[in-house]
Structure formats: C-alpha cells, structure tokens
Image (spheres, rainbow, N blue to C red):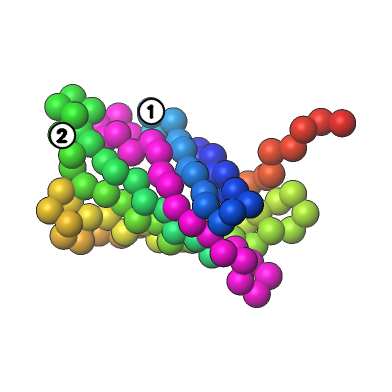
Amino acid sequence: MHMYVFNADGTMQQANPDAGDAHAGDSDGKGAWVADAGRVRGKWIEVMADRDTHAFTGRGEYALQVTVAGDHLRGQGVMHLFDANGRPNGEIPTMFEGDRVIVAK
C-alpha cells in the first residue's frame, strides 16, 4: 500500500511501509505532477538500499497518470528500475486506485 501527497505547488511525496520489501529500503519517493487534460501526470524517484548492509543498490523512477473523480482516484504507471551504476534493470507496470484523505466534518 502506498500513500501519495500531491502538494499545490506541483511537488509530490510517496511512501509505503518498510515491510513492503523486506530486502530493499525503498519506502520514500519525491517527485512532481502537472494537471493535463482532466488528469494528473507525475513522476517520482526513490533511492534504494540493502537493508542489511545499507549499501546503495539503485533507484526507481515511477511515471504515472491519474484520473480523479470526486474523492476517488484511479491510475496506472510504470516503475523503471536502475541498478547502482545507473543501468536499466527492468520495469514494473502497475494499476492502482484510492481515495482522498479528508477530515471528517
């Protein structure tokens, strides 16, 4: 499970639980977003490390598109993986949906 924060200035933050990957530290990403023809396009980058040695193991760059309907969002994206030397190391296509966090009245 991920949590996204889309800030009004076009920046964004992403987080997922540490237990999401027991071998690699990949729990925080920072990026940018823009409104584009009724949807949101964005990209965030995370740095990855080995949890045991704390050594840098690479990075992930996630490009996404989101459609918002009221307080619900639905989207898709692709995580492009790079090794510690910056070489491409695969990609993971995803689909997701979620709800806006709101303060109860």
Label 1 amino acid? Answer: Ala
On the question of residue 88 being in view, the answer is yes
Point 26% across, 35% down: residue = 24
The rendered magenta stretch, by its main secondary structure, is classed as: strand
CA separation in Å, label 1 and label 2: 18 Å
Q: Is residue 84 left or right of residue 69?
A: left
Q: Residue furthest bottom?
A: 37
Residue at numbered disc 2: 55
Point out the frontmost of discs 1 and 2. Answer: 2
Residue 1 vertical position relative to residue 52 in the rendered view, above or below: below
Q: Residue furthest right?
A: 105
Q: Quadrant of the C terminus?
A: top right
Residue 50 vertical position relative to residue 7 in the rendered view, above or below: above
Residue 33 part of the magenta-drawn span:
yes
Point 65% across, 74% down: residue = 37
Mark seen at residue 61: none
Point 44% across, 58% down: residue = 43
Give x and y (percent) for residue 90: 25, 59
Q: Is residue 63 left or right of residue 66?
A: left
Instruction: Please report the bounds of the magenta region as a residue range.
Output: 21-40
Circle nearer the N terminus (1, 2) = 1
Point 40% across, 56% down: residue = 62
Q: Secondary structure at mark 2?
A: loop
Label 2 amino acid? Answer: Ala
Residue at numbered disc 1: 19
Q: Secondary structure at mark 1?
A: helix
Q: Quadrant of residue 79?
A: bottom left
For label 2, the crowd category at 10 Å Cα-Cα, with few meaning under 14, some 14 to 19 and many 20 or more, is few
